[in-house]
Image (cartoon, helix red, strand yellow):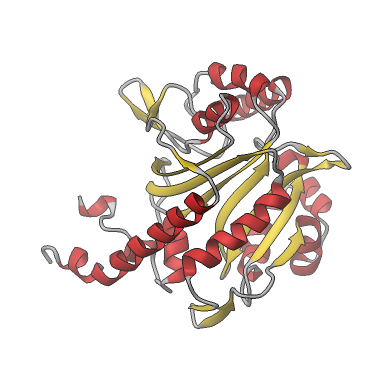
């Protein structure tokens, strides 16, 4: 086989480079500063469902989130980063354990502002009014669909979000019944997740049973995850403690508490932030069958 897999990806890698160039052009035009933060960190965010890869006593980052928020707290109001991230045990046609993430953070903004910005960014990156993905035509030019998580459950799962949570079927129904129906004719933002799924998002002031969090889907594929950021260090610590306890209950590696991040939250302005999987975005824009088709090397090829 030799270098054939690498050679056959040439056109995809050329188009991937062009997409990355347009993304940088978009942010530079809006006054964002491109930043770099360390890949190897002492304390990842303790999330029960995301596992970091150990690296000489520290860990490879699962996301640049904590370091970028410390930059927000230090007075950088608009920052973005394109970087490598690692998550242990993630591999499949839509997953790589080492992948490329785009994250950006904007002070004095909330998740609604970020929805508008995300839509504008993806349209700019695509440089087309429509795309084809898995034999379906997806319109990008018009307004994108926005639907609450509660409405998505009623529409696609035939039950309420709260009933699914009570029965422990929330994640199963999301994966099997809801996600495959999102973003098919046009991209879909699904927003206002239940408070128990808030992660690092703030709760909605007008309805604290839900969190100001959204995800973007295109062609049934999750592309991005975003929040109005939680800036209360006491509440954030309590959530981390709960997540760490869940990790312990599952027999997973314990992480040190990210104390420097928690200390910085006192100085962090109101802000919104988003993580967007660039390999997945390129996969959709190029109508690729597998994420392997849009990266230069997979782990197995090294």
Q: 167 above or below 248?
A: below
Residue 244: percent from the left, percent from the top? 59, 25
Q: Is residue 145 above or below residue 83?
A: below
Asked whether, in this view, residue 10 is left or right of residue 64, the answer is left
Taking depth in this image into account, of 272 and 32 the one nearest to the observer is 32
Residue 298, quarter of picture: bottom left
Query: Horizontal and vertical percent for residue 288?
Result: 40, 71
Q: Nearer the viewer, residue 83 or 52?
A: 83
The residue positioned 34% from the left and 68% from the top of the image is 15
Q: In this orientation, which residue lies closer to the viewer: 161 or 227? A: 227
Give the x, y percent position of residue 129: 55, 77
Residue 19 is at least partly visible in this image:
yes
Is residue 169 in view from this perspective? no
How many numbered markers are drawn? Answer: 0
x, y percentage for residue 187? Answer: 62, 68
Q: Is residue 272 left or right of residue 125?
A: right
Query: Quick check: 269 above or below 84?
Result: above
The residue at the point 58 percent across, 41 percent down is 105
In the picture, the quarter occupied by the N terminus is bottom left
């Amino acid at each position: 086989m030799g270098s054939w897999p690498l050679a056959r990806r040439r056109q995809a890698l050329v188009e991937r480079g062009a997409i990355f160039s347009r993304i940088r052009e978009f942010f530079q035009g809006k006054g964002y500063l491109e930043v770099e933060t360390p890949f190897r960190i002492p304390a990842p965010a303790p999330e029960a469902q995301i596992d970091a890869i150990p690296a000489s006593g520290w860990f490879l980052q699962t996301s640049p989130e904590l370091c970028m928020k410390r930059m927000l707290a230090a007075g950088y109001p608009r920052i973005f980063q394109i970087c490598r991230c690692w998550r242990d045990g993630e591999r499949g046609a839509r997953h790589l354990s080492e992948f490329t993430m785009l994250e950006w953070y904007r002070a004095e903004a909330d998740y609604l502002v970020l929805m508008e910005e995300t839509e504008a960014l993806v349209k700019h990156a695509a440089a087309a009014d429509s795309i084809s993905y898995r034999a379906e035509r997806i319109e990008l030019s018009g307004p994108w669909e926005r639907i609450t998580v509660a409405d998505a459950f009623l529409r696609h799962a035939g039950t309420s979000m709260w009933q699914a949570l009570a029965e422990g079927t929330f994640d199963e129904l999301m994966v099997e019944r809801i996600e495959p129906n999102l973003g098919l004719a046009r991209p879909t933002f699904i927003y206002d997740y239940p408070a128990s799924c808030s992660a690092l998002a703030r709760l909605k002031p007008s309805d604290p049973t839900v969190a100001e969090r959204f995800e973007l889907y295109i062609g049934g594929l999750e592309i991005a995850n975003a929040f109005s950021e939680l800036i209360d260090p006491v509440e954030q610590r309590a959530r981390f403690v709960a997540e760490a306890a869940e990790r312990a209950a599952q027999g997973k590696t314990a992480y040190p508490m990210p104390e420097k991040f928690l200390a910085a939250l006192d100085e962090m302005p109101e802000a919104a932030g988003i993580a967007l999987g660039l390999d997945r975005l390129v996969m959709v824009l190029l109508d690729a069958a597998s994420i392997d088709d849009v990266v230069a090397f997979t782990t197995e090829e090294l």
